[in-house]
Image (cartoon, rainbow, N blue to C red):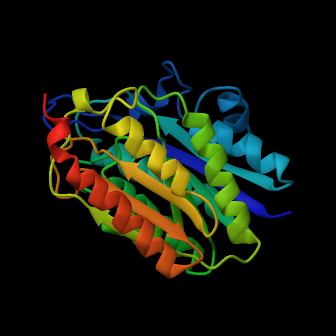
Amino acid sequence: MARIAIGGFQHETNTFSPIPATFADFEAPDAWPGLTRGGAMLEAIAGINLPAAGFAQEARSLQHELLPLAWCSAQPSGRVTRDAFERITAMLLEDLGACGRVDAVYLDLHGAMVAEHIDDADGEVLRRVRDRVGPGVPVVASLDFHANVSKQMAIQATALVSYRTYPHVDMADCGGRAARVLHDLLRGATVTSRLEQVNFLIPLTSQSTLTEPLQSLMAEAQAAERSPILSACVAPGFPAADVTDCGPSVYACGTDSSAVSTVLQRLAAELKRREGEFAL
C-alpha cells in the first residue's frame, strides 16, 4: 500500500474572453463541486464522471491510501486571475506539506489553463509540486482531451494521461488509467517519456471522436497503450488558448525508450499526414 496525494485544479482558458476566472468562480459549485479540501473532497467527487473520481476508485481497488488535497474547477472563461491561481496553488502545496511522507502524487488538471501572469499555468502547477516532493516521487497527471501539452508539463510529470473522447464520456476512465500507470510506477517501473507538439491548429468543431480522422487516431493511441507503453496520448489541443504551447500534441511514456520513440513517431506522423481532413 502506497500513500498517494490526490488533488486537482481545472480550467479551460479562452484567452480571447474578457471575463476572468476569479477565486469566487472556483469556490462556487456548478455541474461539478466547488473548491473542496481534505476528506470532504473525496466525498464531493465520488460517483461523478471526473478523472479524480475515477482515479480514487481505481487506486483504492489497488489497495493504496489516498491523501486528499484540494480540488476545484471553474467554467471555461478568460484567464485565471493571479489571485485565484496563487491562492489555489498555495492550497495544494500547503495540503501536500501537511500529508507528511507521500509515495506519489496524482493531479487532476485540464492542460489548457492560462493565468494572468503565467501562460503555461498547468506546467507551473506541476513544477511547484515537483519542487515540493523532489525528483524521486512519481507525479502523474490526467489531462483533458483539449490540453495544450507543454514541454514543462511533460518534464515535470513522471507520466501524463489524457481523455480519448469528445464529447467527453471517458473522464473517470482516464483517471482510472492514471491510477494504473501510477501503480506500475510504484512497483518500480522506470519510464521514459516523449512529447511532440504539432505545428497546426485543429478547430474544436473538427475534434469529435465520433467521426474521422480522430475516431481512428484515438483508436490507434489506445491500441498502442500496452506493455511496455504505459501511456499514449493524442491531444488535439484548445485553439482558443492563444499561447505559445497552443495546438495538438502526441505524448508517450513507457519502460522501453525505443518503443516509446517508435510509438510517438508513428502517431505523430499519422496525425500530421491527416492534417487536411480537419478542414471544414
Q: Looking at the image, which residue is at 28% across and 52% down?
A: 271
- Rendering quarter of residue 228: bottom right
Q: Is residue 69 left or right of residue 39?
A: left
**Quarter occupied by the C terminus:** top left
Residue 98 can be seen in this image: no
Q: Position of residue 174 (x, y in %)?
A: 57, 43
Residue 84 can be seen in this image: yes
**Quarter occupied by the N terminus:** bottom right
- Rendering quarter of residue 187: bottom right
Residue in the foreground of this view, choosing between 109 and 189: 189
Q: Position of residue 200 (x, y in %)?
A: 15, 51
Q: Position of residue 89 (x, y in %)?
A: 46, 53
Q: Looking at the image, which residue is at 61% across and 36% down?
A: 172
Residue in the foreground of this view, choosing between 154 and 229: 229
Residue in the foreground of this view, choosing between 230 and 22: 230
Q: Looking at the image, which residue is at 40% across and 40% down?
A: 216
Q: Position of residue 253 (x, y in %)?
A: 51, 68
